[in-house]
Amino acid sequence: MSVAFFEANLSVKQLLLNIQQMFDNQTYQDAVIHLQPLSSINDILNFHLTEQPIYGSARLGVRNLERTEVYARYLIDKKHVTAEPEDPTQPLLLTPPNPEGNVANLLQDQPEYSLTLGNKQYELSNHLGNVQVTLSDKKLGQAPPESSSFTHYLADVRSVVDYYPFGMQMPGRSGSGGYRWGFNGQEKEIGLEEYYSFKYRIHDARLGRFLSIDPLESEYPWNSPFAFAENRPIDGIDLEGLEFYSVHIRENADGSRTKLFVVNYTNIKNAGDKNVKTANGFGPRGDVGITYVIHKFNKDGKETGIESFNVKNSEHGIYAGPNNPKQYWDKPDASGNYPDDYSLSPIDETDNNAKQHDLDFDGIPPSGVNGLAGTLDERSSKANIDFIRRADITTNKYLKGQNDDITGKPVTKATSDAGQKAARTGGFGFRSFKFAEYLKNIKIEKPKGP
């Protein structure tokens, strides 16, 4: 193509022609809808990212990319002395130590580096995930009157929020400062402080109700389909997203537990006590793998509440990885570990391959092997090689368009890739089972001499 696909002087018409030649018709039709209203290609080039979420194991805060305040500056490999500003609201300048006292020469010869503070907003949340305070990443120096020396520092507080039980902000005790996340860690509707966007429904914090019915209403007939967290906002949250199964367990007043029933969302026939047909093999509760729901009963046999937690395996399905399903209704061993639960159906052939590999590990005498040590144990070679063989069978099915033994549908690329990742390319807590077998065959000679 003689004309560049995307450049500043390109007309919208020419860009659409390029898209039509390079992509399928659906992509072209989508581009027409979004690009035709633009007067110039420069309208597209002016788009930019305004903020970036900060994540650890969960969302920690947000980085505002539009703030340009440079709060600190330093030179020469970050070696510097600190010049404290008299006004703590002004940028703090850090300059390098210079034995000769000639900063001008230093600036001519050395590059300058900037540390931007004040554009990050970190969350402080309570046990329900409610964002109550946000802080920036800079500190504010405090000095006594008529003094230029700081005696202490204060946090740069950007927002403070106190909530009524169902999430409404308390007047006079809140100042959100434009932060978009709040009650249960959910995002507020634009321009509406008391409406929160859960994944599937909108929550009205003033009413303490969702504006549409619970997708799982048939599974919880005793609850209002509009209720938030079963009307237990003090210690409950409303789960959202996707899951393979939810396992329901009864916990009696004496702490004993029994398994109640399993809800299956995988579309695998008869894989649960209750089988819910879904559009994509996931249920409506969070990309969490398996949800365990503990129904608590008092000594009179009355249900007093529900607690839930999730177990998600790190690689694929419910068995591929270190976090297998557990029998949380059984008694734990001396180390506090619950026995594995192999009663749940795998989601596809690769997941079934991982389940069989785990069972093979459990069956290695005298008492089974597990983890990295088990993978490298000489006794596990047969189990590892069998996994590789089964992964190759699944991949061949994918290449030929044949059906998955578990789902009854054609093997997907994701299923094939997950199997090969564990077998050869790395995964499941180790580079690969093939690499593990390679290491076992390496002969290391002992050093000669005394």
Image: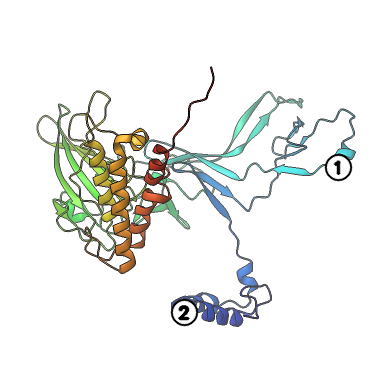
Residue 280 in the image: above or below residue 244: below
Q: Residue type at mark 1?
A: Asp
The residue indicated by pointer 2 is 29
Between marks 2 and 1 in the image, the one whose residue lies nearer the viewer? 1
Image position, residue 275 (x, y; %): 17, 56
Q: How is the image coloured?
A: rainbow
Taking 46 as reference, is 79 left or right?
right
Residue 244 in the image: above or below residue 447: below
Seen from the viewer's position, the closer of residues 78 and 364 is: 364
**Mark 2 or mark 1, earlier in chain:** 2
Residue 109 disc label: 1
Seen from the viewer's position, the closer of residues 132 and 331 is: 331
Report if residue 391 is visible in the image: yes
Q: Secondary structure at mark 2?
A: helix
Mark 2 Cα-neighbour bin, 10 Å: few <14, some 14–19, many ≥20: some
Residue at left offset 34%, top offset 43%: 321
Query: Which quadrant holds the N terminus?
Result: bottom right
Image position, residue 165 (x, y; %): 34, 41
Report if residue 168 is visible in the image: no
